[in-house]
Amino acid sequence: MPTEFELRRRNAEFAEKSRTGKNPIKPSRREQLSKRSPISLWALGAIIFVVIGGILLEVLRLLFL
């Protein structure tokens, strides 16, 4: 069984290789959060619904009134 020192050394080597791009790894949680949109999907859907609904109501008002 490897000692704690060996595990730390291997982890450090793996981290260095992954930073340089030699080993493909899953993106870290910090990287995933940095790529996320600042607005959630349901909020974006609500904004689009209000804007599109407003446009449709305005077109209907212009056509029928």
Image (cartoon, rainbow, N blue to C red):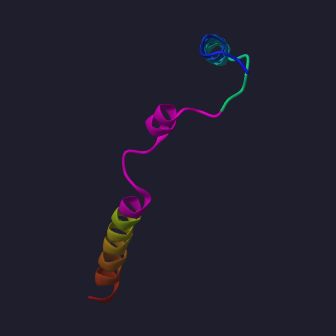
Q: Which residue is drawn at 64% across and 34% down?
A: 26
Is residue 58 positioned above or below 42 on the image? below
Whether 38 is among the magenta residues is yes
Image quarter for residue 20?
top right
Name the residue nearer the viewer: 3 or 20. Answer: 3
Is residue 4 positioned above or below 41 on the image? above
Name the residue nearer the viewer: 32 or 12. Answer: 12
Name the residue nearer the viewer: 14 or 64. Answer: 14
Residue placed farthest to the left in the image?
Answer: 65
Is residue 35 positioned above or below 8 on the image? below
Image quarter for residue 48?
bottom left
Percent x, y for residue 29? 50, 36
Q: Which residue is drawn at 50% across and 32% down?
A: 31
Question: Magenta segment, which residues?
Answer: 26-44
Percent x, y for residue 11? 63, 18
Percent x, y for residue 27? 59, 33
Q: Residue at x 45, y 39 (%)?
A: 33
Q: Quadrant of the N terminus?
A: top right
Is residue 48 positioned above or below 8 on the image? below
62 sits left or right of 52 in the view: left
Q: In which quarter of the image is the C terminus?
A: bottom left
The number of numbered discs placed on residues in the rendered structure image is 0
Residue placed farthest to the bottom in the image?
Answer: 64
2 sits left or right of 44 in the view: right
Percent x, y for residue 54? 31, 72
Q: Residue at x 46, y 43 (%)?
A: 36
54 sits left or right of 27 in the view: left
Name the residue nearer the viewer: 43 or 21. Answer: 21
Image quarter for residue 21?
top right
Whether 3 is among the magenta residues is no
14 sits left or right of 50 in the view: right
